[in-house]
Every structure is written in structure tokens, then in C-alpha cells.
Image (tube, rainbow, N blue to C red):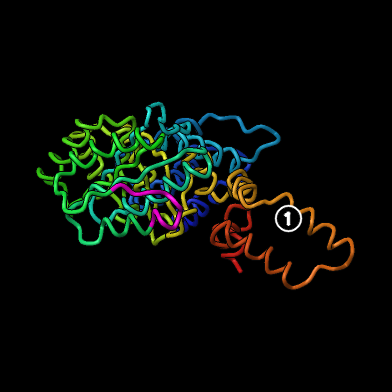
Amino acid sequence: MFNSLQDKLDKALQNISGRGKISEINVAETVKEIRRALVDADVNYKVAKDLTKRVQDKALGQNVLTSLTPGQLMTKIVHDELVELMGSTHEGINLSGKPSVILIAGLQGSGKTTFSGKLAHYLKQKRSKKPLLVACDVYRPAAVEQLKVLGGQVGIPVYTEEGALNPSSIAENAVKFAKENGHDVMIVDTAGRLAVDEAMMNEIKSIHYFIKPEETLFVVDSMTGQDAVNTAKAFNDALNFDGVVLTKLDGDTRGGAALTIRSVVEKPIKFISTGEKMEALDVFYPERMADRILGMGDVVSLVERAQEQFDEEEAKKLHKKIAKNEFGFDDFLKQINQIKKMGNMKDLMGMIPGVGKAIKDV
């Protein structure tokens, strides 16, 4: 995630590292390299230009404190601007309804159905909710079956209507079903198209009108770069959604969509998805993402993942075994499996400050 951008920003900031003071010349050189790095990462040129202009204005005339080098000061300014660009603060999901209805929208192939399953799993495991998945994609072959499989994997029921072709009617009936069966959250997976068209927009507007969701989330494939931003803008103009979800951030993505989308559609990024596993869903925190982009790691997220997999009883048993010199290969295997549940090892190492860069150097 963001490897290319991270490398280029690191090189740009090295331009000013080791300098005795911040001057107009070395700031201009650094800012030019930062702008080039952002544009290469598929960040909208106007957004990149505005960000680097703010960085330059803040850097010029700054007195470097005795405890800081020009490089450290410049890194802090860039970090603060990246946080601001991605939304400043984390914005949570609205679960105030009874049941809370969450409508999932997006283009075909963006990962809506997989995200619906991940979100249901997240709400069940971390928010102690009783979710219901609703299959409203009546066009794509096997879309309903895919949602059933995902629901089965995480132990969450899926509401379907065999042979029904009216998504608005299915969604309305699902609300009644959720109320009758004690489900406090309802996640509605809708159909997508290969491009934004009138038929899709009318259908999603109709579903939105009938079920009046507390939260409408637009799912974006990060790998499509600026196309993702343009699609989000078109959807937002028609639907006025509440938040964005970025999927496939573990793929060969340059990160431009993540950096640009907030400033273009003025809607917060709420979740990021980084893999196929049902656990591979993270709440989006602008500050943590800026840390990762600048190679500072993300210790808070790493600790959170470790806490999720930590079993206190198992840890006590293990402690006793080590004390009695009875730690065997079976115990070692359990430890490895716990680490594997935390996610991809490369991603985990990247969350430790300095380690991600060191691995690349090796």
C-alpha cells in the first residue's frame, strides 16, 4: 500500500534533511519533488498543487527549533497537510436507527458484496450488533449466492427473495423481516454497472427513497485511480452519500484515490479494505494513514490487531508451560496461527516505524 508514493516522498524530504536552515531555494526544490511524487501517485494535479503551495507557505520563514532539523520540520508540515487532505479526523458510522439501515452502492467489480460481508462481520465482532445481509443485486449472476457464502462464513443470515426482480420491494420487505427477527443493523448490497448510467442511478435512488437508510456508503476500487474519484463525484451529485469505502488497497495501487477523494466529493472515507479475508477491514483514520504514507508506521493499529487476537487464558497457560520448560511445537504452531490471523506479515512489519523501509532496503 502506497509503496511507490512512500519511496518518492522519502527521497523528496531527504533533499532538505541535513541542511542547516530552511531557505527559499531548498524548500522550492523539496516542494517540486513532493508535487511530482503526488502526481505520479495519481493525485489530482490541482489538489497536489494546492497542497504543495500550502506546504511551501508554511515552511518558508519557519524557525527551526534547536531540537528539530529542517528535514523533521518539513516532514511534520507535509504530515499535517496530508491529514488535512484526507479529512482531519475519523468519522464513525451512524447506527442510530432501529434497525440501522446501511445502503451499499458502487460500480460493478468495486468489491461491494465482499465489503458487505466484511462490514457485517465487523459490526458483529467489534460493535456487538446483530446484522442482517440483504441481497438486492438481482442482475449479476451468482451475486445472491456470493452473499450467502460470505454470510455463512461469518455466521450472519442473508435475506433473499427467490425470483424477485424489484430491488426496492426486496429492501422494503427486508426492513420488516429485520424488525420481526431482532436484527439491529441491516446491510443492503445493491447492483452495480460497468459505468455510471441513468438506469443504475434511478434504481439506487428508488431503494434509498423506500428504505431511508441512516448510512449510504459508496464503495470505490482504489486501483482505478482518478476514475474512482470521478465516479464518486457523479454518484454523490445524484445520491448524496454519507461516506466512502476504499477497497483493494493491498493491490498495485498508487494511492491517488485515497488522497484525492475527500477533497473532491467532500465526504469522509470511513473504511479501507486490504484483502479477501473477512477480517481484512480497517476503520479509516487520516492521521494513521498519513503516518503510513510517510513511513512512520502505525503502532496504534498494530496494537489494536494484536489485542483482537490476544486470548488471556491461552496466554496464562503458555506462561506456565514456558516456566515449566514444557513449550512444544504445538504451542509454537498456535502462536504462529495467532500472528497469521492478524494479517499479512508484510503489512504488519510496515506498521512498525522504520521496519517497513528497512525490509525494502534488505
The front one of 45 and 28 is: 45
- Residue 107 position within the rendered picture, expressed as x and y whole percent measured from the top left: 23, 50
- Residue 342 position within the rendered picture, expressed as x and y whole percent measured from the top left: 58, 56
Residue at image point 41% right, 39% down: 270
Q: Measured along the vertical axis of the image, is residue 250 above or below residue 332? A: above
- 290 left or right of 307? left
Residue at image point 78% right, 59% down: 318
Q: Measured along the vertical axis of the image, is residue 152 above or below residue 286? A: below
- 218 left or right of 82? left
The answer to whether residue 316 is magenta is no
- Residue 222 position within the rendered picture, expressed as x and y whole percent measured from the top left: 34, 52
Q: Where does the magenta region start and end?
A: 150-159
- 51 left or right of 77? left
Residue at image point 61% right, 45% down: 304
Q: Which residue is mark 1?
A: 314
Q: What is the quadrant of residue 141 in the picture?
A: bottom left
Residue at image point 29% right, 59% down: 145
The front one of 136 and 174 is: 174
SS type, badge 1 = helix
The front one of 240 and 328 is: 328
